[in-house]
Amino acid sequence: MSPDPRDEERGLPVHCATRTLLEGRVFDVLATELTLPSGIRQELWTVEHPGAVAIAAVQANGELVLVRQYRHAARECLVELPAGRLQRGEDPLAAARRELAEETGLRAREWRPLTTFYPAPGFASERMHVFEARDLQRGERALDLDEDLEVLTMTPGRIMAEVRDAKTLLAAALLLLGR
Amino acid sequence: MSPDPRDEERGLPVHCATRTLLEGRVFDVLATELTLPSGIRQELWTVEHPGAVAIAAVQANGELVLVRQYRHAARECLVELPAGRLQRGEDPLAAARRELAEETGLRAREWRPLTTFYPAPGFASERMHVFEARDLQRGERALDLDEDLEVLTMTPGRIMAEVRDAKTLLAAALLLLGR
């Protein structure tokens, strides 16, 4: 990648050269040489991720529909919102409908964007789009063969006390704040 | 790494073999072969990160002290809580005191743990420890040479509307909820 001369004018770091260190099924790793506004040169590694969606599916009783699964990165089972990666060029809302149906068997009639954020911008490009889904109907689950999920429900208050996943905590907090 | 026979008894996936794909200054990447309870074998890549701390430093007027910096992973400048990686074996609170002083020049007399979470447990091992800091005193900043940070302040309400970083949004939401 050649440097964009406008970057220097805007006071942004100029990136001079990018190498691909790894190409994977879920993410790639790039090494980029940056010249900071201070003149210092730095090689920075980034995890390049296609982005993801998560769904805060709210039942009529106010509880959220969650999934419990083994997360090898954390070396433990975690409780999280249903979620999944964006496919290339996929619209986030379409991905959210797909993931909710695949992981829980639920369809929702009401959808709205709840929040969008970077989970770990220090090293990962991933953007997470969270949708709120209401007016839920039960359908068939269609799990990927490599998914092993248990579906459960919790109130937002219990999530704040017991869950340890960023997107799930933030969604529960936003619902408690009435946003 | 040889499989732990207790994992199978507990219904957890058994991991059979781990290869190191990359070793970096900030993170490593491992490939692990897992056998899921369903019997399916899977090779999973994980970003192995030492963990991090972030500080919700609350001024007497209720505003949080934030830093704005270029984040190459996001390809943009982001506003975030002061934060940094844990050094090997470092106590999270000690790291939080160090990072707050380095990035903002502030010391705090009151500290309490606010929340701990996994930012991106689908692929990254990172655990983030967020502390609330109050009764702030101004000191000297001691930035690393490769850090180029602007210090600013915002109310928790404005953070919820304008910021796009997970740890910062979650800390602001927790403060608004009075937790």
Image (cartoon, coloured by chain):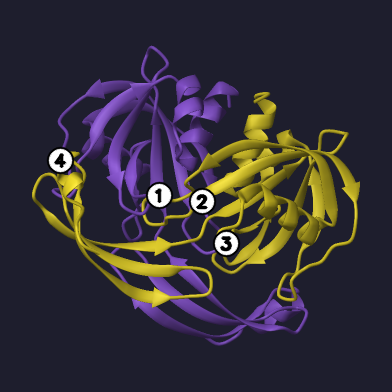
Chain colours: A purple, B yellow
Mark 3 element type: loop
- Residue type at mark 2 is Pro
- Report whether residue A83 is seen: no
Residue found 51% across the figure and 51% down from its top: A119
Quadrant where the C terminus of chain B sits is top right
Give how far across and how far down residue A54 sits, in percent: 39, 41
Left or right? Give the position of A40 relative to B118: right
Q: Identify the chain of the residue marked 2, using the numbered disc in the image.
A: A
Q: Name the residue under label 1.
A: B121
Determine which of the numbered discs, if any, sits on residue A122 in the image: 3
Q: How crowded is mark 3: few (under 14 residues within 10 Å), some or many (20 or more)?
A: many
Q: Identify the chain of the residue marked 1, using the numbered disc in the image.
A: B
Tell me whether the residue at label 2 lies in contact with that at label 3, contact meaning CB atoms closer than 8 angstroms. no
Q: For the residues marked 3 and 1, what is the alpha-carbon distance in whole angstroms?
A: 15 Å
- Residue type at mark 3 is Gly
Q: Identify the chain of the residue marked 3, using the numbered disc in the image.
A: A
Left or right? Give the position of B165 relative to A160: right
Q: Name the residue under label 2.
A: A119
Tell me whether the residue at label 4 lies in contact with that at label 1, contact meaning CB atoms closer than 8 angstroms. no
Q: For the residues marked 1 and 2, what is the alpha-carbon distance in whole angstroms?
A: 10 Å
**Toward which corner of the image does residue B158 lie, by quadrant?**
top right
Q: For the residues marked 4 and 1, what is the alpha-carbon distance in whole angstroms?
A: 24 Å
Tell me whether the residue at label 3 lies in contact with that at label 4, contact meaning CB atoms closer than 8 angstroms. no
Left or right? Give the position of B126 relative to B111: left
Q: For the residues marked 3 and 4, what is the alpha-carbon distance in whole angstroms?
A: 37 Å
| Closer to the eye: label 3 or 4 | 4
Q: Where B12 falls versus B25 (above or below)?
A: above
Asked whether the residues under marks 2 and 4 belong to the same chain, the reply is no
Residue found 25% across the figure and 22% down from its top: A137
- Residue type at mark 4 is Glu
Q: How crowded is mark 1: few (under 14 residues within 10 Å), some or many (20 or more)?
A: many
